[in-house]
Amino acid sequence: DAGITQSPRHKVTETGTPVTLRCHQTENHRYMYWYRQDPGHGLRLIHYSYGVKDTDKGEVSDGYSVSRSKTEDFLLTLESATSSQTSVYFCAISGTSNYGYTFGSGTRLTVV
Amino acid sequence: GESVGLHLPTLSVQEGDNSIINCAYSNSASDYFIWYKQESGKGPQFIIDIRSNMDKRQGQRVTVLLNKTVKHLSLQIAATQPGDSAVYFCAEQGRSQGNLIFGKGTKLSVKP
């Protein structure tokens, strides 16, 4: 997927546990995004980053935090996972702010 | 995965026919538009884009039409093939708005 890797691809976790998803890119792109995708809702933006240590909230940021200590890595953390956070999570990258995104293959997270 | 296609409008076409997928966008200030294709179990994949100073753009077997008057975007796929079966999303972005906003998608089903 054009130099973008998400890990893990699948994860099952218990309610109340912390979970961290990783997005790694080799394109040296400035912008990175985390989306969740749910039936009936499409892709919804959780958080995004416009540079190292520069992040901002998206549409559905409650219950999530992010960190970007290096250009290539963007981490999404669920501090205390809930069943409503069961979803497919996609990372995306972009070289500029007004151009299309390249998406990773996704992480399917199930919170039981 | 398969859950991406749930609750979505579905377009069913015969192999070899042309497909037209429509999208109504929300922001009259949006000046950049993209169509993405998402196959089962994969991340969205860029198909074609168009900027607001154009009303038509062609790619390989695909054409995007933009009607700014009625805020409508369409994707035409010529000679539709079974491999075109997927969910198709439109996305819009404004000049002063850094993030893409995605539509909910249309599921295209191609009958052999």
Image (spheres, coloured by chain):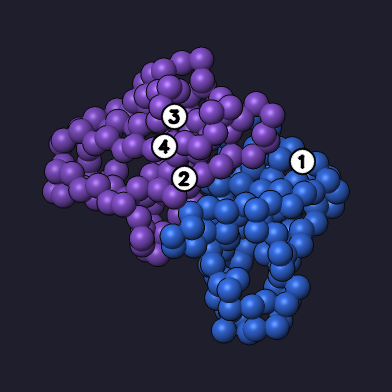
Residue A9 vs residue A44, the one in the foreground: A44
Instruction: Specify the amino acid type for callout 4.
Output: Ala
Q: Secondary structure at mark 4?
A: strand
Are dots 3 and 1 in contact, CB under 8 Å?
no
- x 79%, y 49%: residue: A55
Q: Label 2, on which residue? A: B103
Q: Which chain is purple?
A: B
Q: How many other residues sit within 10 Å of disc 4, few (<14), some (14-19) or many (≥20)?
A: some
A102 with respect to A26 (left or right): left
In the rendered image, residue A83, in percent from the top left (x then y), is placed at 58, 78
Chain containing the residue with disc 1: A
**Residue A42 numbered mark, or none:** none
Are dots 2 and 4 in contact, CB under 8 Å?
yes
Chain containing the residue with disc 3: B
Q: Label 1, on which residue? A: A50
Q: CA distance from mark 2 to mark 4?
A: 8 Å
Instruction: Specify the amino acid type for callout 1.
Output: Tyr
Q: Label 4, on which residue? A: B24
Say if A86 sits above or below A50 in the image: below
Q: CA distance from mark 3 to mark 4?
A: 6 Å
Quarter of the picture holding the N terminus of chain B: bottom left
Q: How many other residues sit within 10 Å of disc 1, few (<14), some (14-19) or many (≥20)?
A: many
